[in-house]
Amino acid sequence: MKNLMFVFAVLALAFTSCKKDNTDEALVPCEFVDFRYYGDHVQTIGELSPDYLLVGIDESTSRDEFEELISDLELLDHSYSPVGDLIIGSNNHMHVVKTKDSKSCEELTGIIQELEQLEQVQFVHYTVQTDNCDNLIWEPMGDLCVDSYSNEFLVKVEDPSELSQLNELIEQTNTTLVEQNQYMEQWFTVSADKQADGDAMAMANLFFLSGHFLAAEPQILKRPVQ
């Protein structure tokens, strides 16, 4: 059954899981994936934010250097000042950028593709609207937050001594094996940067629907933007 679901997932990823406006054929297709799998259940992650994107840049690039790199992108609000602490990933820093005005999914996808042309940019992700602006210990982070996800997702295998299916799918999707959890040996971290066949949300869904793994889950992030 999961193998059949995998076929449908591949077809679905060729289109968009968000609403499209077909009135302008010059726009690139919307690639926002608005759901994930939590166990065997489909969980909607929320409504696309039209104003913010999450950008992962090489850890050697400072915020000031990044601002200089994107200074020519006219669709971004260069007066926007980031809120909260820097998000540090395995080998990157993650920054929120704001658009000049609210954008459609297709317009955001175009900005993502433009940002990904920069060598220092490892990935760019959509963000999601949320009413919850508290951290994990219920402390307020700001006046307004968005949710997003890192470039890494977690995969749970049935037998950690047999990784042929994991390695094969990683090769097929241009993703990267990062590490095995030293305390929970069935769990592996996989990364999906701009060279992968989809972002970490799309790839987590694809890995789960392959039927080869017990779970595949993106790493959700919450960021204050005001």
Image: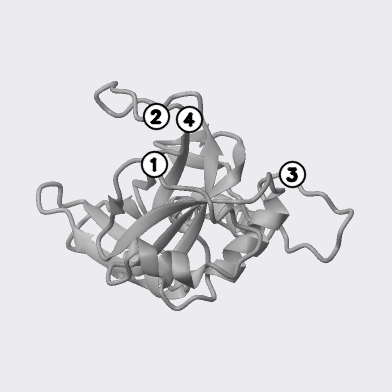
Q: Which of marks 4 and 3 is nearer the N terminus?
A: 3
Badge 2 vs badge 4, beta-carbon distance below 8 Å: yes
Asked whether the residues under the numbered discs 4 and 3 touch, taking CB atoms below 8 Å apart as contact, a structural biologist would say no
Q: Are marks 1 and 3 in contact (CB under 8 Å)?
A: no
What's the residue type where badge 3 is placed? Lys
The residue to which callout 3 is attached is 19
Q: What is the crowding at mark 3: few (fewer than 14 residues within 10 Å), some, or many (at least 20)? A: few
| SS type, badge 1 | loop
Q: Give the residue at x 30% y 50%.
A: 86
Mark 1 or 3: in front is: 1
**Residue under the image location 50 percent in, 54 percent down:** 125
Which dot, 4 or 3, sits closer to the camera? Answer: 4
Q: Could you tell me residue 139's position as x and y percent?
A: 28, 23
Q: Mark 4 or mark 1, which has the lower sequence index?
A: 1
Which mark lies nearer to you, 4 or 1? 1
Give whichever of discs 2 and 1 has the lower sequence position. Answer: 1
Residue with the mark numbered 4: 144
Query: Pointer 2: what residue?
Result: 142
In which quarter of the view is residue 192 placed?
bottom left
